Amino acid sequence: MILVAGEALIDLIGHEGDNGGYLPVVGGANANVAMALAKADVPHRFLARISSDSFGQKIRSHLQSYNVDLSLAVDAAEQTTLAIATIDSSGVASYSFYINGTADWAWDSAELPGVEAITELGAKAVQFGCLTAAIEPGSTVLANWLTELANFGDITLSHDLNIRPSLGFDRATELDRVTTLNSISHIIKASDADIEWLFDLAPGANLDEIANNWTNQGQLLIITRGSDGVQVHHNGGRLEVAAQKILLVDTVGAGDTFMANFLIKLDDFGALGSNPRAKLESLSSDQLVEALNYATAAAAIVCERAGCQPPTRQEVERRLQD
């Protein structure tokens, strides 16, 4: 079972230059991951604080339509977080947010299951990141909880940075936060844009030195690079997989779908759970390439659909065969 911890919010989606207004749809990076796992019929739980307001009811209904397991979700009194997603002419989404005092960041430590409870649930991995890991006061509560899980040592911790510079975060503070979370994680996923912003680098800069620093405790690092494909840094080496050719509609949820499906393949290989670092180190290059190609195909399917509509396993396998 894979436990996903993080935000479930409402994306108000509109298109640049379109006077048709904004359509409310369920979003949030971690909600998208949970939806992708559910669509692939993978055992999972989604640990989220979901508002009881009308938007929160819409979120619950939508996630339940995907068979997302909400048995650990908190029924929160705070209002739903809103993200304004504007799709440009090339299909790429830019975001602005309404986050003050909303449900996703109000975590209390009592709302998070302890190590014993997670073990009883059979969780092999915890997927986390994006805004829930960045916005106070909940981010500190979550970081302390993740540290406890890291010290336990039998659960794979997977961190997807998903940096949102539009929220006005201080670069140095964000770098310190990310570095701390990376140090306790076993899998790290970042886009090249995430890393370039954190280190104030020009687009296209060489990221190998940063990658080496982020993997010096045995972590597996994935760097997504849009149409330039994906890199994985592992066991001191680097592998690359090309992006698929797509008929782009938009990129909403593509990275989240990639992450979910990468974990799915690692689980197929028995690479999640007890002794996380040793299991990841034992992965062969062929297995990693297979996992990357699988996740890339899943993300490509989402890019050819409006919004985050993750594929089934059968759809991904057909895509790879074709």
Image (cartoon, rainbow, N blue to C red):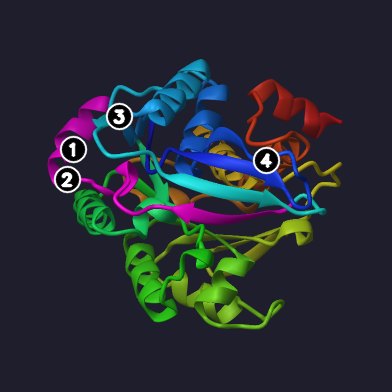
CA neighbours of label 2 inside 10 A, class few (<14), some (14 to 19), many (20+): few
Residue 14, which numbered label? none
Precedes in sequence: disc 1 or disc 4: 4
Q: CA distance from mark 2 to mark 3?
A: 13 Å
Q: Amino acid at mark 1?
A: Glu
- Residue 90 x/y as whole percent: 81, 54
- The quadrant of the image that shows the C terminus is top right
Q: Residue furthest front?
A: 19
Residues rendered magenta in the picture: 92-121
Precedes in sequence: disc 1 or disc 3: 3
Reading the image, the residue beneath label 4 is 21
Q: CA distance from mark 1 to mark 4?
A: 37 Å
Q: Amino acid at mark 4?
A: Gly
Q: Residue at x 77, y 46 (%)?
A: 18
145, 60: nearer the viewer:
60
Q: CA distance from mark 4 to mark 3?
A: 31 Å
Precedes in sequence: disc 4 or disc 3: 4
Q: Amino acid at mark 3?
A: Ala
Q: Quadrant of residue 254?
A: top right
Secondary element under disc 2, as helix, strand or loop, is loop
Q: Amino acid at mark 2?
A: Asp
- Residue 253 x/y as whole percent: 61, 42
Q: Is residue 167 left or right of residue 242?
A: left
Precedes in sequence: disc 2 or disc 4: 4
Reading the image, the residue beneath label 3 is 73
Question: Residue 44: in sight, yes or no?
Answer: no
Q: Quadrant of residue 43?
A: top left
Residue 108, which numbered label? 2
The number of discs equals: 4
Residue 103 is one of the magenta-drawn residues: yes
- Residue 201 x/y as whole percent: 61, 83
